Amino acid sequence: MQRYNILWADDEIDLLKPHILFLNDRGYDITPVASGADAIDAVEKEHFDVVFLDENMPGMTGLETLSYIKNRRPSLPVVMITKNEEEHIMEEAIGSKIADYLIKPLNPNQILISVKRILDNRRLVSERTNMQYQQDFRTISMEMNDQMDHKEWAEMYKKLVFWELEIDKTENKSMHEVLEMQKVEANANFARFIEDEYEDWLNDPNGDRPILSHQLMKKKVFPQLNDEPFFFIVIDNLRFDQWKVIEEDIAPYFNIEEEDTYYSILPTTTAYARNSLFSGELPLEMSKKHPYLWVGDDDSEEGKNNNEAEFIKRQLKKNNIDARFSYNKIIHANQGKQLNDNFSNLLQNQLNVVVYNFVDMLSHARTDIRMIKELAADESAYRSLTRSWFQHSPLFDLLRMISDKGLKVIITTDHGTYRVKKPFKIAGDRNVNTNLRYKQGKNLGYKGNNGIFEVPHPEKLHLPKLNVSTTYVFATDDTFFAYPNNYNHYVKYYRDTFQHGGVSMEEVIIPIISLNSKRA
């Protein structure tokens, strides 16, 4: 067992010998000193894991000593001990980033708990987390093998995200590999669930189905509209796990009224899912009613989402809502800053729709730019990079401005993304789309169907057919499509990248968060 070194500074240190012996017996080595000056001298000469510091010492006070120690050893944890419970002393000590604050008279267990919380916290958390996940592992596996509905699958995904984030916090990530295997199994079962249920969701209005992309604004956004300005923020490609890491930053400013999920339509891409979100229609309906607004796979990548404002306008009209609205798409930070500078004008609208493309751009940049791939080497790093961007983004500034005005906001996305690993060889003519997680076209050539969801009759899933023989194929599990031409290069380039368009919990089950300002 590791022994820790503790420095204890108190002008009545001789009276604390029973406490020192108590800690000695439990594996802690104590260096006692009787003044702030002696404490500073000891810190300069030796390494300590934690310092106990009496606030009321003659000569150099505890607060003065604390200031000196923090200047020289900013990472050294300091526990302030005092008889004085005056508020300003506690505030000053806390403002100086103390690790804990104890009031005399002390008891041995109180001291031991403080030490363990500071020195053994990560180890204890790691052990406890791994043990709890092991206990939950069997329950999760049994649930996955049952016939689950869409609500249960959403809860299953949330549970797996919870354990992923908890294990991230631990020092010993021995259970991470086990969790990854369980997520792979869950996604295989989820793909079968989608194959069985998705068509019925689209065609049976009376069936038990989740909220889908084309229903979201009508069911969640429009009921919020009144005389007060309301904000609807769509962060492209934001997964539920990414929401959970930025939630901590948002919590001081908003109360979470509802933390829910909805299901993206297929394909889980911006052209299909987000246009469906803003139009309130499925792709087949969009292609027939708005052929000049909705751009399909036979057209260039450019301009597939250039008509989102018009789609919103038409959906409002379709639902007999006469509301003044704004639409802003943010691709660059300067655009976000310009939007914030125009915030007072936004308050004249009943609905403000803001699309942020950064997270989607991050996932694509990770594919194309080696440095970004190294910065976001795994899921944990990808989440961390997302949070870092958010903390320094104009979006965070916008949310704080919304909070200051006491307003409500919904944060959501159009689809998630999935880390792909296994290539699936597929062939097609030059008109076949280039997306790695779904293909549509005629005469698609491939062997076997393991890892894919085949749709020979796209009209049943309300998908447009460019030709009579058009077929859609969606990747499931961690599969991505690769062409036979230059196959090895293609696989090497795209393996271990974040992609979307297919069927996985991460792509399909996506967050919708209703927030109310804490100033309201």
Image (cartoon, rainbow, N blue to C red):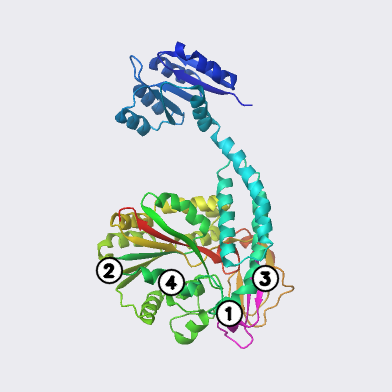
Which residue, given by chain and number where applicable, does mark 1 sit on?
Answer: 461
**Could you give the CA–CA distance between mark 4 and mark 1, rounded to whole angstroms?**
21 Å
Q: Which is more N-terminal, label 4 or label 2?
A: 4
Disc 2 and disc 1 in contact, CB within 8 angstroms = no
**Could you give the CA–CA distance between mark 2 and mark 3, rounded to whole angstroms?**
48 Å
Where disc 4 sits, the SS reads: helix
Q: Which is more N-terminal, label 3 or label 2?
A: 2
- Please name whichever residue, 306 or 28, is drawn nearer the observer in this view of the structure: 28
Q: Amino acid at mark 4?
A: Lys
Describe residue 356's horizontal placement relative to residue 472 as left or right. left
Q: Amino acid at mark 1?
A: Leu
Which residue, given by chain and number where applicable, does mark 2 sit on?
Answer: 227
Disc 2 and disc 3 in contact, CB within 8 angstroms = no
**Residue at the image point whose x is 55% and y is 70% from the top:** 268
Which residue, given by chain and number where applicable, does mark 3 sit on?
Answer: 452
> Which numbered disc, 4 or 3, marks the residue closer to the eye?
4
Q: Which residues make up the magenta segment?
A: 452-480
**Could you give the CA–CA distance between mark 4 and mark 3, rounded to whole angstroms?**
31 Å
> Which numbered disc, 3 or 1, marks the residue closer to the eye?
1
Where disc 1 sits, the SS reads: helix
* Image coordinates for residue 517, horizontal then vertical, percent: 34, 56
Describe residue 352's horizontal placement relative to residue 446 as left or right. left
Give the residue furthest to the top: 14
Could you say which disc has been placed on residue 219 in the image? 4
Q: Which is more N-terminal, label 1 or label 2?
A: 2
Residue 94 is at least partly visible in this image: yes
> Which numbered disc, 2 or 3, marks the residue closer to the eye?
2
- Please name whichever residue, 358 or 494, is drawn nearer the observer in this view of the structure: 358
Where disc 2 sits, the SS reads: loop
For disc 1, the neighbor class at 10 Å (few under 14, some 14 to 19, many from 20) is many
